[in-house]
Amino acid sequence: MTFSFAITVIFWLYVIFWIQVPGMLLVEFLLPRRLKAYTRLLSGFFLGFICLATIYFIESIIGVNGLIAIAGPVLSVIAFIRYFKKGRPSVYNAYEHFKWLGIIIFGFIFIVSTINFQLKYAGALSGQTTQVYHDFLFHTGNIVSLSRSFPNGDIRISGLTFYYHYFYELIFAMCKHIFGMDAFRLYINGNALICAWPLTLAMMIIGERLRGNRSIRGFRYYSYYAGLLVSCICLLPVNVVGAKLPTSWLNNHLFGNGNAMGLALSVTVLLVDVLVEVWYDKFSVRVMIAIYLLAATATGFKGTTGIVLVTISWSVFIVESILVKKIHMPRFFYVFCASLGFVLTYMIVTVGLNPSGSNNRAMEVTPAGTLDASRVGQVFSKLGLDYMAFPWVIIAVLLCIVCIVGPCILAFTAFAYSKFRTLIKEKVIGDIFDWFVIGSVIIGVVAFCSVSVPGLSQGYFVITNAAFIFYGAMKYLIENKKTLISYVTYLFFGIGTAFLIIDIAYFCYDDIKQEAVYESEAGDRQDLVSADTMEAYLWLRDNTAEDSLVAVDRFTEDLDYRSIYFYCSAFSERQVYIEGYDYSDITEKQVEAMLSINEKFFSEDTAVAEADMEMSGVDYLVVTELNHPDYWENSPKLKLVFTNDDVSIYRYYSDGGMSAVNK
């Protein structure tokens, strides 16, 4: 079983005393007290995280271990001392009060996340076969790498600096660095909390903005705060060819957090909420620092999120300055600091200074990728129409927008239209939050339709903005109650509720089906890993030095064209010479060169194998029956250290090392 009560408790304590409580101390120093409780709590989470990450970065640079281990408790003690000295003030302001709905939403997301993610892999390490979705293995490997230092190299490609929006993994990595626990179990047992806590707070922020000063009950009360989960935004079968279940692309990401989309959505809501609250305030250096840190955090969780936030911030600032015919310098500095946080994090963490733009990171400015993978493109093709030719491309793109936004597009479009009409006719800007929402959604939708990324990752532009799409739609429904659009939208919210129930049932069914996979034989299937192979990887983890370099002969799951086999790096927790490389920022020429060298490690020519292993610094050779059934070790420098029916592991000794062994 992958479940561990001890790991779960440790991770909860880590989140509370190393992230949330220290973060609340920073909130007290950097942000106005008048911000609502949910905004301050969510700010505390993200500021606490970036504070701990900064300390970890310093620890890694100066080489002094233990800084983040003591940082959490020390900052938490300081926070509690200040709290008691101030007379234990409530987290709520005078006009706020505790809402049980927040607890209900948190509990619901936590339970469904557990069903969707944790229970699915409960038996992953205890059956005859292991099968874990490649994205989750990728994250596990990143946790291992980042637990050793921040930043660090790519654990799947030896010698390659690791660039990625990896702040999601860094949350777990810092916990592993402090407490030294198994990466996969830590990830499995801690993910539900990271899914539920930030997302709940973000949904409560949206609900509070929708409610305003109104007193509401019943259906409207729940729809304001929890309606996002039944909004029918990003329905998977409607948008992706071949997709059937789950019905909601959005909820699948929110309940699994596999690509940090729940965190990206939450920090997007937070940064815009904070910007709007201080937009008309006097200039504050403290607020400027907070905005810089939050923008850097947003970019580290998802590069696309940072791009959208910076673009909309400048857009609102410039347009407003033109309308009022005045440049407000405090707003300029706030937007500039947000941009600085984005640029520095994007260059240092996410892409580096010289990205290759290869493999899964390739990006093209064209709607082809979106149309190729969408139902719209499929329908056009069946009708014999070239969806990339004029005028069909325009029609196809517009239909893709309708499909990805879903039924909320009716109310959101009406909301945006009313805001623009008021601005043009009455010269009234109105609530600046609404303009951030409208602009952010437009930017996200345009990016979705104009950018192509492998794996349809451009969909993240829309998922990031899902809370804003819902907000805009609900804002229209609140102001226009008895209209056809409101009736249709509420009807689809009802359908969305049914979809949510179906998806939860599907998650349960998928858990049961996955358990059956664990009890089956792996055979020759590349997408399954036998218990013997897992035993070999875990042997490497438990019996080799942490800085060992491992060479493997498995690179693909044979599920598609990509090389996305990450099992050895994830479970052995050891640096691999080259494993799955399609998520790594490495050029095709580099891959070909490394694969050529890697193949020589398994060569029958002893001199060639020894020379390349010596040159590459390989310590262990992992030979599988699946890919090298006739491998015969004939080098005196290779010593068999582990073997079973599926895998043999050899220790390679360099000239000096072999001499020591012989003595």
Image (cartoon, rainbow, N blue to C red):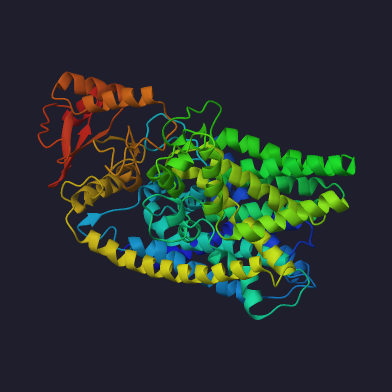
Quarter of the image that includes the C terminus: top left
**In the image, is residue 353 above or below residue 105?**
above
Q: Residue at x 58, y 51 (%)?
A: 464
Q: Residue at x 79, y 53 (%)?
A: 421
Q: Residue furthest bottom?
A: 218
Spot occupied by residue 13 in the image (x, y as percentages of width and height): 53, 63
Q: Residue at x 17, y 30 (%)?
A: 638
Spot occupied by residue 428 in the image (x, y as percentages of width and height): 86, 53
Q: Which residue is nearer to you in this view: 417 or 309?
A: 417
* Image side of residue 622 versus residue 373, left or right: left
Q: Which residue is nearer to you in this view: 486 or 354?
A: 486
Spot occupied by residue 443 in the image (x, y as percentages of width and height): 64, 44
Q: How many numbered discs, if any?
A: 0
Q: Residue furthest right?
A: 325
Residue 423 seen in this snapshot: yes
Quarter of the image that includes the N terminus: bottom left
Residue 22 seen in this snapshot: no
Spot occupied by residue 529 in the image (x, y as percentages of width and height): 23, 49
Determine the image quadrant of residue 575.
Answer: top left
Q: Which residue is nearer to you in this view: 565 or 617?
A: 565
Determine the image quadrant of residue 343.
Answer: top right
* Image side of residue 112 versus residue 233, left or right: left
Q: Which residue is nearer to you in this view: 47 or 73?
A: 47
* Image side of residue 14 versus residue 514, left or right: right
Q: Residue at x 17, y 37 (%)?
A: 627
